[in-house]
Image: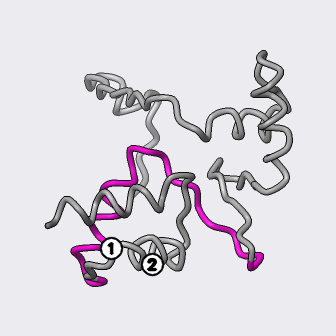
Amino acid sequence: MVEDMVSSSLANKPLAEIYSIQVEPSWMDPLVTFLKRGMLLEDKGEAEKVWRKAPRYWLSKEQKLYKRSYTGTYLLCLHPEAMEPLLEELHEGICESYIEGSLAHRTLTQGYWWPSMQKASQDYVRKCY
């Protein structure tokens, strides 16, 4: 049996609330803006840095930023707020390790990258002692 409805059955139901998630600015923002829209920063020095770095990066259809590694593979660039959970999983999860250098290397081999990953890995491992 098929029922022909003139109006939506959802019209009388209350609308769901939508929450906005605010993410702080990061090192990726100027690169994403340049790759997406071709816009550079107003500061000439910073704009030149972004312009020189941009060929090493790629923006996917899903708007994810990737950096080309020295081997030619692409590494997913991580937002600073996502670093801690990733390091925790790699350090204490199934890949457990207590060696500072190997945590940064393991992060690379898992396909992730951010500018201060060596220091962040060292700091994270030192918190465990």
Q: Mark 1 = which residue?
A: 90
- Residue shown at 31% from the left, 83% from the top: 95
Q: Mark 2 = which residue?
A: 106
User: Is 100 above or below relative to 7?
Assistant: below
Question: Viewer-proximal residue, 61 or 29?
Answer: 29
Label 2 crowd (10 A; few <14 / some 14-19 / many >=20) = some
- Residue shown at 26% from the left, 66% from the top: 125
Q: Tag 1: residue type?
A: Leu
Q: Which residues are magenta?
A: 71-95
**Is residue 58 part of the magenta span, yes or no?**
no
Direction from residue 1 to residue 37 in the image, left or right: right
Direction from residue 21 to residue 50 in the image, left or right: right
- Residue shown at 43% from the left, 53% from the top: 2
- Image quarter for residue 72? bottom right
- Residue shown at 75% from the left, 54% from the top: 57
Looking at the image, tell me whether mark 1 or mark 2 is earlier in sequence order.
Answer: 1
